[in-house]
Image (cartoon, rainbow, N blue to C red):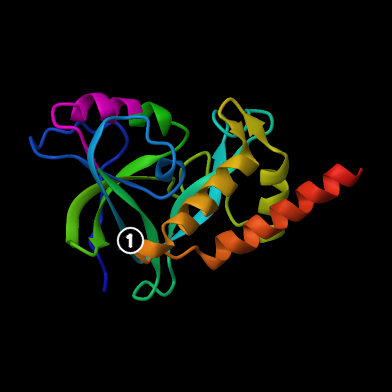
Amino acid sequence: MTVPILNVGLGTPWEQGRALWVFGYGSLMYRVDFPIEAQVFGYIHGRKRAFLQKSHDHRGTPSQPGRVCTLLPATDSIESVCWGVAYKVESGKEHEVKALLDYREKDGYSIEFVSVYTKQGVLGDVMVYVGVSSNPSFAGESSIEDTAQVIARAEGPSGSNREYLYKLCNTLRQLSHEGVVVDEYLLELELRVREIEKESLKK
C-alpha cells in the first residue's frame, strides 16, 4: 500500500488549528525534550531507516561529522515499514514545540506529513523530519562498514555517535512487547560498531 506524503519544507508554520503529532524514528524515540499529552507506538509504510544523515552539530563536528538517522524510500514499498513513536504535542504548545524541533533538526532536515499505523488505528498527517537525498548533509551511499567506522569514532555536543546508535537499538528492544521490531540493518550496524569499539580498547 502506498501512503501519500506531502513534503512541505522546514519552517512551515503549523496553522491548521488542530492537534500536532510528531513521529520519532531516531533520537526522538528516547530523547523527548518537549511537552506531550500522549504517545503511541506505530510504523510508517514504504520507508526504511538509515544512518545516512551527517551530524555536524549533535553527534559530530563540522570537521568530523557523525551519522544519524534519516528515512529512505524502500524498494519493496508495500512490505517495508519503519517503527517509531508518534507523540501528541501538548495543546497550546504546538508553535513553541515546532520551533524547538525545527532548530533541533536544522542540519539538513525537512518536514513531511505521513500516516502512522498503530494498534488503535491510523493517525493521519503526522509530522516527521526527514533528511532527503538532495540536502547538503546527506551522506549518500555508504556500506555498513564505512558507516560503522564513522559512528564508532564521532563525538559531538550531544555525546558520542555510538551512544545515539546504542540508545536507539535498546529503545526498540524495550518496545518489543508492543510488536516493535529492531531493523536487521540496525542490528548489523550495532554489532560492527561494538566490535570496532572493542578493537580500539585493545590498542
Can you give x and y, in whole percent of width and height, for residue 83 in the image?
38, 59
Placement of the C terminus among the 4 image quadrants: top right
Mark 1, other Cα within 10 Å: few <14 / some 14–19 / many ≥20:
many
Query: Residue 191: x and y, percent?
Result: 68, 59
Out of 141 and 78, give the one closest to the viewer.
78
Please tell me whether residue 94 belongs to the stretch shown in magenta: yes
Please tell me in which quadrant of the rendered image residue 160 appears. Answer: top right
- Is 36 positioned to the left or the right of 155 in the image? left
Q: Residue 74: tell me if it is visible.
A: yes
User: Residue at the location (13% across, 27% down)?
Assistant: 92
SS category of the residue bearing label 1: strand
Question: Looking at the picture, does residue 63 appear above or below residue 87?
Answer: above
**Which region shows up in magenta?**
88-100
Q: Position of residue 121 (x, y in %)?
A: 17, 63
Q: Who's the residue at 25% across and 62% down the image?
A: 118
Task: Name the residue tied to disc 1.
Answer: 43
Residue found at x 62% / y 33%: 60
Asked if residue 143 shows in the view, the reply is: no
In the image, 109 versus 198, the foreground residue is 198
Q: The N terminus appears in which quarter of the rendering?
A: bottom left
- Relative to 6, say whether 80 is above or below: below
Q: Quadrant of residue 5?
A: bottom left
**Magenta span includes 159:** no
Residue type at numbered disc 1: Tyr
In the rendered image, residue 145, in percent from the top left (x then y), is placed at 72, 58
User: Could you tell whether 198 is left or right of 98 in the image?
Assistant: right
